Amino acid sequence: MRRPWGAGLAVAVLLVLTVMDLAQHYDVPVAAVLALAIARALSLSLSWLRPRAAVAVSLVTTAVMAALTTPVSPSEPWPWGTTSAFGHSLVIAIAGARGLGRRELVGWWVATQALGVVALGLAPDRGSWPGLITMTVLSGVAVVVGDLLRSRADTNRRLVEQETISKAERAERERLQERARIARELHDVVAHHLSVVVVRADSAPHRLPDVPDAVREEFTGIANEARASLTEMRRVLRLLREPVEQPETGPQPGLDQVAELVESTRRAGAEVRLVSDVPTGLDPAVELTAYRVVQEGLSNAVRHALHAPVEVAVRRTAGELEVTVQNEKPPRPVVPAPGSGHGLTGMRERVALVDGTVSTGPTPEGGYLVRAFIPVAEEVESADHGLGG
């Protein structure tokens, strides 16, 4: 109950009124007066916590009270005293409001009327048949009131649940709209510029006269790298636009492509060296994560220390994969590009998804080190590096 003091006050008032009613209007042993009053008050106090038990206790108390009491005059109601009628009806109403169903309430109403009929049939000299009408009406009103209160509570609860669902749906809709907006921005800006790079790199040997073969190969490499980036960008856009997560069915890069990644970075003008044999045959998620660490480490080195030598190592140790990308001190300071730091943050998040750890920071010699430790759960015999399926 929302106001415990109100329930306590109602119980206390019913206790006092029952004592006064029994003592003044009925011939009943003094010792039984307080016991019956306490039982009546107990049934009311239980109605908020144990509705069914409360109605049962109230009905039994009413039956015992009718058996032990004798009206002091023919004008006194019996078998239903004033406090019995109002107290029992109040218990029924509260029990209905606290969750008793309509059929159950009607069943208790019928049991109450049956008890009155049986009591009057056994002791017709104590009361009269018209005296049963009061309890019939009061308990009937209690059944209706209890059912209405329960229905109102159920309606309010459903409204709250619906409101909660609506808020969740709105949040999900806003999230999907934001993902679609990001996808549009990426498509309009990044994908567009990558497409322009591909077109210009492919057409450069035809537009520019007397292009040397080395330059022609350089343009071809630039176009191929841009196409690969564009392919991955389209995969990201598809994931952003699709509200239901779809499994990736295309092959994802793995450790067997690290050497190719190092070579492509070397062709871009960086001095990169792969200093260890790269293990293969690991879990595809582990291999993809390690590949992305190398990719981001090389991008970070090229961006911040273009002419500094870079060493890449991927080693398998006991229970984990160690990935390091370390560049030496650049020959001249490099101004960081706008937005620097987001790639390292994304790399840490990616490694954390496979329960790995990443450490990044400058070295004592003035270079920069990216080191990741990725747990290796199991070896995979298949050489397929797709994450889908």
Image: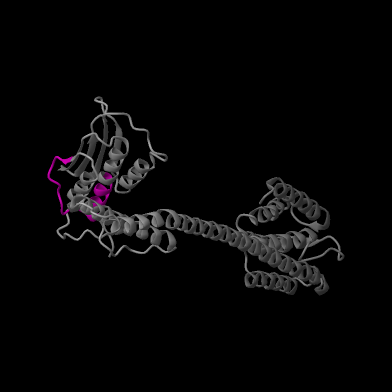
In the image shown, does 172 or 296 lie closer to the viewer? 296
**Which span of residues is magenta-colored?**
273-293
In the image shown, does 217 or 307 lie closer to the viewer? 217
Above or below 186: residue 104: below
Which residue is found at the position 67% from the left and 61% from the top? 97
Q: Is residue 166 visible?
A: yes
Image-based side of 23 in relation to 263, left or right: right
For the image, the number of numbered tags is 0
In the image shown, does 84 or 176 lie closer to the viewer? 176
How are the colours assigned in the image? one colour
Task: Say whether residue 284 is magenta.
Answer: yes
- What is the quadrant of residue 36 in the picture? bottom right
Image-based side of 251 in relation to 167, left or right: left
Q: Position of residue 379 (x, y in %)?
A: 17, 53
Outermost residue, top side = 364
Q: Position of residue 269 (x, y in %)?
A: 23, 42
Task: Say whether residue 34 is magenta.
Answer: no
Outermost residue, front side = 209
Q: Position of residue 296 (x, y in %)?
A: 30, 44
Which residue is found at the position 63% from the left and 73% from the top? 103
- What is the quadrant of residue 272 in the picture? top left
In the image shown, does 287 or 214 lie closer to the viewer? 214
Q: Position of residue 139 (x, y in %)?
A: 74, 67
Above or below 81: residue 286: above
Looking at the rendered image, the quarter that the C terminus falls into is bottom left
